[in-house]
Amino acid sequence: MTPQGEFARIAAEDGRAALVSVVAGGRSGAKLLIQPDGGTSGGLGDAELDREATAAAEELMWAERSELREVEGVSLFVDVTAPAPRLVVFGAVDYAAALCRLARAAGWRAFVCDPRSQFATRERFPDAEEVIAAWPDEAFARIGAIDRATYIAVLTHDPKLDDAALGLALRSDAPYVGAMGSRRAQAQRRERLQAAGLEEQLIDSVAAPIGLDLGALTPEETALSIMAEVVAVRHGRDGGRLSNAAGRIHEVGA
């Protein structure tokens, strides 16, 4: 199969890949397909150009945008296909139901995980992609590889669940791990994670208390606060008010 044909197949199956095409200045029409595991097919006619194209593709396929790039006088178009990002929610609580509704409306795929089968039911979370009644290690195994397009929110208030989920999440490739709880609860959690041998750098990376400061009170407002922070992290933003922002409001792609 040609690189373009393979790219079309991956896109049809809602997968992730980047197809780099020479549009000017080189072997016009040459194509190189790059997949997340580093696999490639095709070529642009020059080994160094292939390396540069691969680096650009690996960056953009996780940024989830297509873009025109100039490499040593050669114009390359990097075409990206990617599935909707995932939000993994630990804790089958009311906040999780509201968060699933909002995530789905925003085009995300939400997964709810909780070993308490009486709470982790499809009826309670109709907007979730999947509801998994299992402990964090089994839940992660069922969800699949936690990659750079998987964001994790820990909403339980049970140390056994919190700590187990965080221990796995913080050692994964997830770009965002947030946890609910008061500042006192966060301090106690930090002590437990330290005692369990988790590195300080990883503990410091937890977004806790989870969400942006919106003054949220209801489950729906809290879900909005969490989803806003997740989206901001995904796009490399701080989540402040646009009226106070400098520079472009929206990124402009190719």
Image: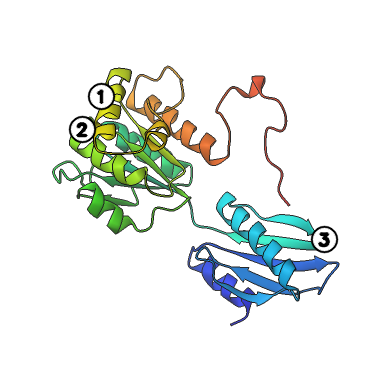
Query: Residue 120, image x and y in percent?
Result: 20, 44
Label disc, if present, on residue 159 of the rendered structure = 2
203 or 248: which is nearer to us? 203
Q: Amino acid at mark 3?
A: Glu
Q: Amino acid at mark 1?
A: Gln
Tell me the SS state at disc 1: helix
Label disc, if present, on residue 72 of the rendered structure = 3
Q: Nearer the viewer, mark 2 or mark 3?
A: 3
Q: Amino acid at mark 2?
A: Pro
Res 231 seen here: yes
Question: Which is nearer the N-term, disc 2 or disc 1?
Answer: 2
Q: Which residue has dot 1 on it? A: 188
Q: Nearer the viewer, mark 2 or mark 1?
A: 1
Mark 2 to mark 3: distance in Å?
A: 54 Å
Label 2 with label 1: CB-CB less than 8 Å: yes
Instruction: State the residue lying farthest toward the left.
Output: 118
Question: Which is nearer the N-term, disc 3 or disc 1?
Answer: 3
Quadrant (top left, top right, bottom left, bottom right) of the N terminus: bottom right
